[in-house]
Amino acid sequence: MKFDIVTIFPEMVKAPLTEGIVGRGIERGLVDVRVHDLRDFTTDRHKVVDDVPFGGGPGMVMKPEPLFRAVETIRADRGAPGAVVLTSPDGPPLTHAVAERLRDLKHVAVLCGRYEGVDERVRQHLATEEISIGDYVLSGGELAALVIVDAVARLVPGVVGDAESVSRDSFATGLLDFPQYTRPAEFEGMVVPPVLVSGHHGEIERWRRRAALARTLERRPELLETSALTAEDRRLLKELLEERERKGAAQ
Ligand code: ADE
């Protein structure tokens, strides 16, 4: 999986990529990330990457030429990326489905925008899509680019050591995760649910599925509308809803 990140703060982007699961994916050659300094694609002595907006107003706007030149260079040196993503709070949100789609493209360029503005011609004629990482405004797209690279890279086979842990992740299953515990079985009076130490794998699986459904129902009920539910899941959900009603009535 190839990524090319274009930014005015290359050091800010490079450091986190050396650590953790993505860092290991890079070391193993499964993920190849190049970070490009936007200023390297300017042609003036002062390496200017932004300018005042036409029509006036506060803030600066990122100039189109360096961004177009950066993508041209990436195309020439690394092949045409399957997507040119502009990070922007105006874009559709990053979801597991978006991350899977980008993973399948094998080569993604990410342009780190700035909210004061990016020349509209970049959005219309250079970026193939915009992606937001949430409904809040960051001071720049660098952290968003790292979030996108992390979410996509961990879906590349082999990057996460245990493939099962990726396919069981929240959102991959369409549900939130079930609660996890580790040793000790009792800590300062707080005990682990007995079923988890029972050794009954079938019962553990059922308990986990029910707990994942319960957590999703409580925190993100809208996910249940699009997740793939079995007949048994629907039965468990009915049970959970009845339980909730009983508790509500008792209060
Ligand atoms: N740039 C500024 N805010 C952003 C956000 N929420 N997502 C992606 N890029 C951004």
Image (cartoon, helix red, strand yellow):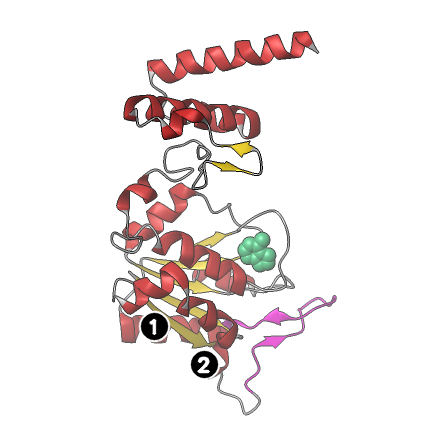
| Range of residues picked out in magenta | 47-64
Taking 218 as reference, is 143 above or below it? below
For image coordinates 43% across by 25% down, the residue present is: 194
Q: Position of residue 81 (x, y in %)?
A: 32, 62
Residue 247's disc is none
- Residue at point 45%, 43% (across, down): 95
> Residue 91's spot in the image, x, y percent?
53, 50
Q: Earlier in the sequence, mark 1 or mark 2?
A: 2
Q: Which residue is mark 2?
A: 41
Disc 2 packing (10 Å; few <14; some 14–19; many ≥20): some
Residue placed furthest toward the right: 57
| Main SS of residues in magenta | loop
Residue corresponding to mark 1: 74
> Ligand 1, what quadrant?
bottom right
Relative horizontal placement of residue 247, taking residue 5 as reference (left or right):
right
> Three-letter amino acid code at disc 1?
Ile
Quick one: label 1, few (<14), some, or many (20+) residues within 10 Å? some
- Which quarter of the figure is the N terminus placed in? bottom left
Q: Position of residue 29 (x, y in %)?
A: 25, 67
Compared across the picture, whether 174 is left or right of 250 comes to left
Percent coordinates x, y for residue 226 in the rendering: 42, 27
Which quarter of the rendering shows the C terminus? top right
Q: How far apart in space, not on screen, are marks 1 and 2 (Cα)?
A: 11 Å
Q: Given contact means CB atoms under 8 Å apart, are the residues at marks 1 and 2 in contact?
A: no
Examine the structure image and report whether residue 51 is included in the region drawn in magenta. yes
Q: Amino acid at mark 2?
A: Phe
